[in-house]
Image (cartoon, grey):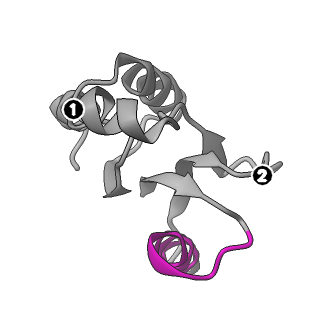
Amino acid sequence: MKIVIINSKFDLKSNTGAEKFSKDLLENLEKKGHEVYLFSSFSENPDNGKFKNIYVAKNKLIRKLLLDYYNPFSKNSIERELKKINPDIVHFNNFYGISTYAIKKVSEKYPT
C-alpha cells in the first residue's frame, strides 16, 4: 500500500512530538512492507526519495489569521506531489500552515 504522511514542519534531527510520531509511523509502516512518503516543510533538505518538501506558511501571524484555513500554495504543492505518487491513503498529522482547505481538497480525491 502507498501511504503519504503529511506533517507541517519536520526537523530530521528532532525526536519529540509530532515529528517523532510521524517518523515512527513511517518506519513502522515500512517494516510492514508499505511504501511510505513524508510530506513536510523540512528544516534542512532531505536527500531521500521518501521525503517530499511542501510549501508551509512560516509567518505565524499571517498563518493564524488566514493560511491555516485557506492556503492555495500548500494545496497546490501537496496536490502536485500526490499526483506523482498516487497514494492509497493520506494521513494528516499536523497541519498548521497547510490549511484545512488543502485537507478538504485532498480528501475529495484520496482516502484520508
Q: In which quarter of the image is the N terminus?
A: bottom left
Q: How many marks?
A: 2
Q: Nearer the viewer, residue 80 or 85?
A: 80
For label 1, count other residues whose C-alpha is less than 10 Å away and answer few (under 14), some (14-19) or many (20+). some
Residue 105 quadrant: top left
Residue appearing at x 53%, y 31% in the figure: 55
Whether residue 109 is situated above or below residue 40 in the rendered picture:
above
Which amino acid does the dot numbered 1 rest on? Tyr
Q: Nearer the viewer, residue 60 or 101?
A: 60
Q: Report the residue marked by disc 2.
A: 48
Q: Label 2 vs label 1: CA separation?
A: 30 Å
Residue 18 quadrant: bottom left
Task: Name the N-terminal-most of marks 2 and 1.
Answer: 2
For label 2, count other residues whose C-alpha is less than 10 Å away and answer few (under 14), some (14-19) or many (20+). few
Write the start and end of the magenta stretch as one range.
13-30
Helix, strand or loop for disc 2: loop
Residue 75 quadrant: top left
Q: Residue 42 carries which label?
A: none
Helix, strand or loop for disc 1: loop
Residue 69 placement (x, y as % from top left): 21, 32
Residue 68 placement (x, y as % from top left): 28, 37
- Magenta span: predominant SS is helix
19 in the magenta segment: yes
Residue 16 placement (x, y as % from top left): 55, 81
Residue 98 visible in the displayed image: no
Q: Report the residue marked by disc 1.
A: 69
Residue 68 visible in the displayed image: yes
